[in-house]
């Protein structure tokens, strides 16, 4: 039978590999084929029903004495959890504090083989998390987002050889210098995350045990509006408040860990619109006075604005390049007639961005372009 299933590498973030090992049934020479099937039941916290995803792989064997033994099969189920999470739509201006939903899931595995043309499915089911009480289902819990490669290189290994990373922070913004924010403009920041206390906790997202009880404090963002010029501390982070310049804008984005943050930036004078033109010929029956005629279709009436981060130290410049410029969900605040409208947009980084220039004594700044995802005039 499939004698066991266990998590061998994973973290609470679904954007990274979440790998399980399944030990297949012992080798038997009379089987035409033998495979392991893994089924994942997953849903967003806000969903009513679970979605199922099946993975399968042929069982491998290796020589052992005068026979063969089956080799453990491994499965990365992160794609199934990501498919469920993709249904979630982030909001530009939610009610704060905003807690983001977790993904609830469990995993089953079983053998399937054929003997003499007869298929034997569902052979001796095993499940994760392990459930020795048939009247109650246990589940794992994970969050949207991903660790980057550098963070993954710091993965820990427990006493059973399991790779894991604990989730202990929700922002990668550096603390080398205060962040500049505008007076009377909302500043969005992730709420400090309570780290897991130890592997095996039943009320925390911890390492190689994704918990068997729903997390009580998932990822969350908060909003703060500063009304006084000068240094301040918000959410345990240092900020420096200045008057909002005439060309200042608030950008909100979903960071790599799946939580909303904001930055306050300035715009240059230039704004561009790239209109794409397609030419077609409308053919019709011609006479001496009637001709086929040309038609043009103009598309992509999207404005592109050039923005700058303002003066930065090297740590902040690195954050802008490696975290902010890679954000996939972003909005910019446009104020018209005293009404704030949040427009979806995306970043168009320069081909090359300088992170350090030792020849200059001045601080760095990151210049980038933002293209609005809606067309029409923005004033």
Image (cartoon, grey):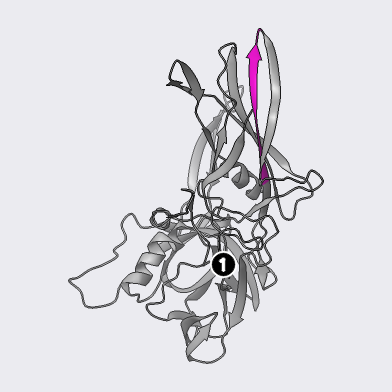
Q: In the figure, is residue 192 to the left or right of 349?
A: right
Looking at the image, is 363 positioned above or below residue 76?
below
Magenta highlight on residue 8: no
Residue 312, position as x, y percentages in the image: 35, 75
Q: Quadrant of the C terminus?
A: bottom right
- Who's the residue at 46% across and 52% down the image? 274
Looking at the image, is 201 positioned above or below residue 179?
above
- Who's the residue at 62% across and 68% down the image? 220
Looking at the image, is 247 positioned above or below residue 291?
below
Residue 245 in view in this figure: no
Looking at the image, is 13 positioned above or below residue 69?
below
Residue 200, position as x, y percentages in the image: 60, 58
Kindly give the residue lying farthest to the top in the view shown. 116
Q: Which residues are magenta?
A: 106-116
The residue to which callout 1 is attached is: 197
Residue 374, position as x, y percentages in the image: 59, 56
**Dominant secondary structure of the residues highlighted in magenta in the image:** strand
Q: Nearer the viewer, residue 11 or 125?
A: 125
């Amino acid at each position: 039978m499939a004698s066991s299933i266990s998590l061998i590498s994973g973290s609470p973030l679904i954007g990274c590999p979440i790998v399980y090992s399944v030990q297949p049934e012992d080798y038997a020479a009379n089987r035409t084929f033998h495979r392991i099937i893994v089924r994942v039941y997953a849903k967003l916290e806000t969903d009513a029903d679970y979605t199922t995803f099946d993975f399968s792989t042929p069982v491998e064997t290796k020589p052992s004495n005068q026979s063969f033994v089956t080799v453990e099969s491994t499965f990365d189920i992160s794609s199934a959890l990501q498919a469920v999470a993709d249904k979630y739509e982030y909001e530009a201006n939610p009610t704060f504090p905003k807690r983001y939903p977790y993904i609830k899931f469990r995993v089953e595995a079983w053998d399937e083989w054929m003997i003499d043309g007869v298929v034997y499915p569902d052979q001796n089911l095993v499940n994760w998390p392990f459930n020795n009480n048939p009247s109650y289902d246990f589940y794992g819990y994970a969050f949207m987002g991903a660790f980057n490669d550098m963070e993954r290189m710091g993965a820990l290994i427990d006493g059973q050889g399991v790779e894991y990373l604990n989730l202990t922070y929700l922002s990668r913004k550096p603390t080398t210098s205060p962040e500049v924010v505008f007076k009377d403009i909302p500043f969005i920041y992730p709420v400090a995350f309570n780290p897991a206390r130890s592997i095996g906790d039943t009320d925390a997202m911890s390492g190689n045990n994704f918990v068997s009880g729903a997390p009580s404090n998932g990822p969350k963002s908060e909003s703060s509006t500063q009304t006084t010029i000068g240094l301040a501390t918000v959410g345990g982070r240092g900020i420096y408040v200045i008057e909002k310049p005439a060309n200042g804008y608030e950008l909100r984005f979903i960071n790599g860990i799946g939580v909303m943050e904001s930055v306050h930036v300035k715009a240059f004078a230039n704004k561009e619109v790239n209109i794409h033109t397609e030419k077609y010929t409308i053919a019709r029956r011609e006479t001496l006075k009637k001709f086929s005629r040309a038609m043009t279709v103009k598309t992509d009436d999207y404005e592109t604005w050039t923005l700058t981060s303002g003066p930065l130290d090297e740590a902040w410049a690195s954050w802008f390049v490696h975290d902010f410029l890679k954000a996939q969900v972003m909005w910019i605040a446009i104020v018209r007639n005293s009404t704030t409208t949040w427009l979806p947009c995306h970043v168009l980084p320069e081909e090359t961005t300088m992170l350090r220039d030792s020849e200059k004594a001045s601080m760095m700044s990151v210049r980038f372009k933002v293209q609005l995802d809606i067309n029409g005039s923005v004033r």
